[in-house]
Every structure is written in C-alpha cells, then in structure tokens.
Image (cartoon, grey):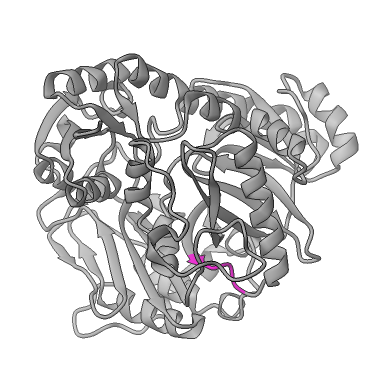
C-alpha cells in the first residue's frame, strides 16, 4: 500500500511527479540540496528535507541521505524521476531493502537493460538487430583495432554505464584510437563510476527512433507508439516528436513489436524506452534501453492521452494495465501489442540555459523574467519562476515546451508561435530559444528528411544564421 512518495529528483520532473501524486491522493516528500532551497518542487511537496550541499554527489546522488529522508518523513515509496539515480540498480535494491516501493523496474531489469553491454546481449537474444560491435568491454587500443577490422571506420566508443548522450566518442581513423579510448574511459569513470567501454559501428546518417513501452507486474507489456529524437547537439536531444514522421507504418510496427518482445522477455514492468537507429534504406538497429521515464515523455502523452507518471505509480502499486489503457479506444487490427492508438502530432522543444553562439556553453544565472507560452494544445513543463536561480551545478534544462495539433504542419506552426511567446531571461542567462525556432524552419526538418547528422554538420556560422533567422515576437523581444 503506497500512501506517501518521496521524489528523489529536482527541477521540472520532480514537480511533474508531485503533481501526479497529488492527483492520485498520495502524499509527497521533496528532497533538495542547499542550492535548491525554496525551489518549486520543494514548495509544492507536503514535506521537504534538505539532504546536502549543492554538488549532486553530496545530495541528489547520496543514497544514504535519501533513505534517511524517507525514514524520517514516513515515505513508503520512492520515485526517481529521470537521470541521477533513476537507473541505478543499487539504489532500487537499497529502496527495497529499506521497505520502500521503488517506482520503476526491478533491480534485475535495471542491471540487464540499464547496462548497455548487457542490453545488447538481451536484445540479440530476443532477435533484435544489434549494431556490430564488441560483446565485452574493451580495455586497450589493440582490442578496439581488432573490432574495427570487422566494423570499419568510423566507429563509436561508448561507456557501458553511460546515458544522456554522455560518455561516447566517434573515432574516424586508427591513429585516433588510443587517445579517444583514454578520454572515454576517463569520462565514464568520472561521470558514472564505471570505466567499462565498448565498441559499436557508427551509423553516420540515421533517424533516432524510440518506442515507449509500459509493463505491469502481471506479465503484460504494451507499447505506446514511436518518437523521433534525431535533432541532437553533442548527442543530447533538443527536439522530439511523436509519432516518428515520414517512416512507413509497417516499419514502425516491426520496431515496436521488437521492443515489446525484448521487454517482455525479461519481465519488464513500469515505463521504459527502447531506442533504435533507422538507416535510409529501412534497416534498423537496437542501440539502448532507458529504464525510466524519459524527458520527452510528454509528446507520447499528448498523442495517446495516457498519463505515463500515473501509470508508473499505479503499476508500482500492483495495478494491472487496462485493456484500454488511459481510456482510449481499442487498438486497430495489426497492432495487438499496443494498448492505445495515437492521434495527431506532438512536438517538444527543450529550452536550455545555454548559449548557441558559444558552442552551447551553459549560461546559468538568476531569472528576472519568465513569460511562458499558453493557448490551445500548448503544454509547458517547468519549475521556473521570476527571481529563482539557475544553478551551475545541474543540467541546464529550463523548460519543455510541448504542442499538439491534428497534423505535423499545424504542430510546427503552433510550436513556432509558442516559442515566440516564451521569454526567459536575467543576468548571465542565455537560452537556445531563437536557435530552436530557426532549427524548426530548416528545410530538412520541415520535410522530415532530417537525421542525427543534421546538427553535427552545422558550423558556427550556420548556428548564428539559424538563430538570427527568427522574427521577433514583438517590441523588446530579447535576442
């Protein structure tokens, strides 16, 4: 029986979870660092506990501090949000050991799918196409060269415990191997406490497509359609949409069926995402699984009508998935693995505190102006308010602007209007708002011929031109 949920996260996702708990009649506990005193999620929760100083390693990543906060507040469940400890099997196990319900997959599922090397094995066993690469970690340049003889160049080095686009590097020539391997192993150890690295063939031009899955504790796994996340800077997503556009329906059905089969094979429960690269010829490859709620989950919610955080909480409490999950209609013939159907198009843009003109360098500061868009079918997930600080210690995500329309053209027009209304600023603060507006007008994105190489191929001049191409929303609109 869950009655009070501790939210082991911060920012917009912590506020999102607190709101869902309140709608379900559940009490809430916020944890926070000294840098987040008075933050929106702290104010919104029923109770709040400061668990450490600003550095995440001493607060949001401190398992003992979080468990102690749960004990003293009487919490009986923990929702980890995304990032931080959300995919840490040791954290999930520690929560269970403390008698807490962990709102997420089992520690065993986190170990086999949360680790990229293990996930490749599980996917291959389930019959999914997996990119050629190393089945085990590589520790020397000689080992990488041996795999390169089979994968060819370019290849990509990835941290086994990586996530969020961090801990990876493309190697284009044999002479670059040793130095790149050293950098990736060092970054992996620093970022994830695990220096294991593996090799994959690098797909240079592909669409990044992911499938949202949802499983209960009674053996049912469904998918809730596709998302496209191909617009990325430094391997981190900045624009997502659902469903993935301009790809054949039968291809997306096959990818979704593979995702469900893989998740079902390990008894997965909770929300999760399986990610794929789709090449221009229709070949597709499994690349990783994310065993948590995704930053981009709102676009799926907008096209399906399913509240994914509600579902996470209900699954954690033992409820089975309904045949018509979220109250939607029965799926059409040919989609037996899905619990719902999608309608229209939804697009999400991540507003980050970063300066595109300076290579997307983080630009923290204190907010003096926060004007958020509104209107029909516009959703903004944020924790911001005028006067609040944007700390340098954490991710630069400020807000997620999400729109829905009956078709993609309408969604693009609505997003441009919504971004034009969005005004976030203050001393030191720069955002990527104008760059996003320019990017959404790029002809390759407009006609859905974009791929993961689009942003990587932009020069500093291209970024400046895209940023300058937008029309000011009105007098005094900040640049």
**Residue 437, position in %: x, y?**
41, 74
Can residue 465 be seen?
no
Find residue 474 and report its image quarter: bottom left
The residue located at (11%, 58%) in the rendering is 386
Q: Is residue 380 above or below residue 173?
A: below
Find residue 172 and report its image quarter: top right
Quarter containing the N terminus: top left
Q: Is residue 240 magenta?
A: no
**Residue 201, position in %: x, y?**
77, 43
**Residue 210, position in %: x, y?**
58, 55
The residue located at (59%, 29%) in the rendering is 115
The residue located at (34%, 49%) in the rendering is 309
Q: Which residues are magenta?
A: 241-245
Q: Is residue 104 left or right of residue 441?
A: left
Residue lying farthest to the right in this orientation: 149
Find residue 316 and report its image quarter: top left
Q: Is residue 250 above or below residue 7?
A: below
Q: Is residue 143 left or right of residue 11?
A: right
Q: Is residue 242 magenta?
A: yes
Main secondary structure found in the magenta portion:
loop
Q: Is residue 198 above or below residue 392?
A: above
Quarter containing the C terminus: bottom left
């Amino acid at each position: 029986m869950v009655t009070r949920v501790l939210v082991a996260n911060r920012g917009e996702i912590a506020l999102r979870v607190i709101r869902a708990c309140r709608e379900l009649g559940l009490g809430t506990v916020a944890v926070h660092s000294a840098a987040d005193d008075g933050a929106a999620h702290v104010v919104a929760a029923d109770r709040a506990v400061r668990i450490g100083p600003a550095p995440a390693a001493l607060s949001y990543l401190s398992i003992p501090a979080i468990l102690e906060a749960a004990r003293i507040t009487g919490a009986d469940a923990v929702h980890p949000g995304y990032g931080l400890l959300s995919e840490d099997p040791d954290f999930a196990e520690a929560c269970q050991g403390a008698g807490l319900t962990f709102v997420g997959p089992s520690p065993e599922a986190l170990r086999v799918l949360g680790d990229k090397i293990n996930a490749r094995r599980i996917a291959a066993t389930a019959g999914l196409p997996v990119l050629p690469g190393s089945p085990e970690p590589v520790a020397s340049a000689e080992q990488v060269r041996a795999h390169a003889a089979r994968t060819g160049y370019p290849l990509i080095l990835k941290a086994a415990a990586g996530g969020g686009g961090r801990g990876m590097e493309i190697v284009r020539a044999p002479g670059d191997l040793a130095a790149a391997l050293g950098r990736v192993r060092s970054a992996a150890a620093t970022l994830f406490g695990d220096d294991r690295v593996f090799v994959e063939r690098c797909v240079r031009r592909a669409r990044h497509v992911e499938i949202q899955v949802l499983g209960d504790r009674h053996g049912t796994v469904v998918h809730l359609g596709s998302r496209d996340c191909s617009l990325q800077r430094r391997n981190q997503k900045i624009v997502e949409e659902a469903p993935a556009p301009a790809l054949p329906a039968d291809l997306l059905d096959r990818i979704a069926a593979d995702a469900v089969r893989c998740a079902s094979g390990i008894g997965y429960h909770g929300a999760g995402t399986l990610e794929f690269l789709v090449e221009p010829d229709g070949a597709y490859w499994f690349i990783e699984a994310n065993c948590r709620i995704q930053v981009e989950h709102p676009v799926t919610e907008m096209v399906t009508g399913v509240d994914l955080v509600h579902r996470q909480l209900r699954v954690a409490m033992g409820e089975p998935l309904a045949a018509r999950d979220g109250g939607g209609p029965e799926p059409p013939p040919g989609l037996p693995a899905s619990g719902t159907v999608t309608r229209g198009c939804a697009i999400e843009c991540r507003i980050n505190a970063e300066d595109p003109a300076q290579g997307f360098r983080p630009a923290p500061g204190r907010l003096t102006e926060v004007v958020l868009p509104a209107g029909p079918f516009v959703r903004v997930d944020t924790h911001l308010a005028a006067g609040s600080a944007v700390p340098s210690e954490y991710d630069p995500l400020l807000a997620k602007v999400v729109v829905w329309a009956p078709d993609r053209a309408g969604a693009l027009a609505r997003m441009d209007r919504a971004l034009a209304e969005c005004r976030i600023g203050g001393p030191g603060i720069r955002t990527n708002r104008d760059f996003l507006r320019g990017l959404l007008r790029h002809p390759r994105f407009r006609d859905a011929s974009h791929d993961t190489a689009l942003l990587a191929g932009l020069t500093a001049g291209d970024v400046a031109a895209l940023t300058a191409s937008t029309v000011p929303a009105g007098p005094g609109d900040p640049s």
